[in-house]
Image: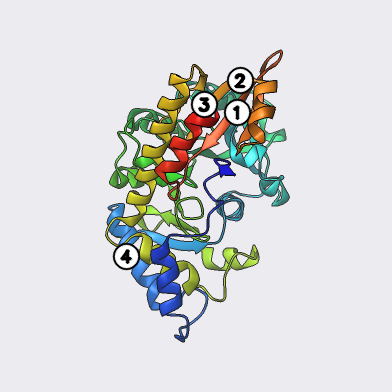
Amino acid sequence: MLSFESDYTEGARPEILRRLAETNLEQTPGYGLDPYCESAKEKIREAFGTPDADVFFLVGGTQTNSTVIASMLRDYEGVVAVRTGHIGVHESGAVEYTGHKVLTIPDHEGKMDAEELDEYLTAFYADGTYEHMVIPGMVYISFPTEYGTIYSKAELEAIHSVCHKRSIPLFIDGARLGYGLTCEANDVRPEDLPGLCEVFYVGGTKVGALFGEAVVFPRRGAPAHFFTTIKQHGALMAKGRMLGLQFDTLFTGGLYFKAARHANEMASLMNRIFIEKGYEVFIDSPTNQRFYVMSRERAEELHGKVRFEDWCPVSEGKIAVRFVTSWATPEENVLALKEII
């Protein structure tokens, strides 16, 4: 059966598997203190134009989000996100489990609006009883968003400006960062990111790695003893080279961006097929997540032929569905959809 369910259903780029096999019997220091992690960190610093960045490797997205957020907030602070933000919807309360509340504001096709963020923060501090409330201590956004949409450079600058005015950090969740940076609609360069936030991470799990996320604090901006915080959260791998070697491979010869670009190209081809077949686009995403409207009956029929996700109700009898391509999606699978849908 064809699968367009997600971008982490396959294993890993063959280049990664080969290097893991080739280095399998090497003996290296643990906990990320090995040459492969050091090499990967240097390549990431170079790719994002931030030579002084602190870089750390963690295993998965939820673990990364909760660890970074907990490390940067005081115990009475919460994190501001849009209501569709991953940390408040699909992470099982991981942030709240660390003792920090997710404070939500409206989204616009998954995106945060800088003016609304400013209004929210202004109204919060205008309330004379605000010290009885959870203090907004950080802002969280995803690039791309949970709807596959992306922020323009100007939009990121506007959000970051609001954060700067309030002296709170901006955290960019980059679980699918490669797909955002390589889509045709994007005007944000990799080297722009360090100037647009206080911390971001480079997603590997969904962009060609077996697992792994690389947290980047530009300008040596990591919280004190962040390494210790990682271990406290159960996020420190003894066999840390498993992470470093994967990112070292992905950031050799532009492989990370090549892998992501392929997924976007396959998504564009898929989108043309859906439009030719007369399906309504639910949200106009430029990345590898695409959303369409169809009747519930049609969706149930297609589930017997192809894997995809029912997203949300649209109207009586109609739902939005999500089809996702990945770094590994072959063109013949996309073309096969034409006969199925």
Disc assigned to residue 321: 1
Q: Is residue 225 visible?
A: no
Residues at marks 1 and 2, CA–CA distance in whole angstroms: 7 Å
Q: Are marks 4 and 2 in contact (CB under 8 Å)?
A: no
Tag 1: amino acid: Val
Which is more N-terminal, label 3 or label 1?
3
Q: Position of residue 294 (x, y in %)?
A: 61, 20
Tag 2: amino acid: Met
Disc assigned to residue 117: 3
Which is more N-terminal, label 4 or label 1?
4
Q: Secondary structure at mark 4?
A: helix
Kindly report which numbered mark, 1 or 2, lies closer to the viewer in this rendering. Answer: 2
Image quadrant in which the N terminus is located: top right
Q: Position of residue 254 (x, y in %)?
A: 29, 55
Residues at marks 1 and 3, CA–CA distance in whole angstroms: 29 Å
Residues at marks 3 and 4, CA–CA distance in whole angstroms: 35 Å
35 is higher (above) or lower (below) than 200: below
Q: Residue at x 56, y 54 (%)?
A: 64
Q: Residue at x 46, y 63 (%)?
A: 56
Which is more N-terminal, label 2 or label 1?
2
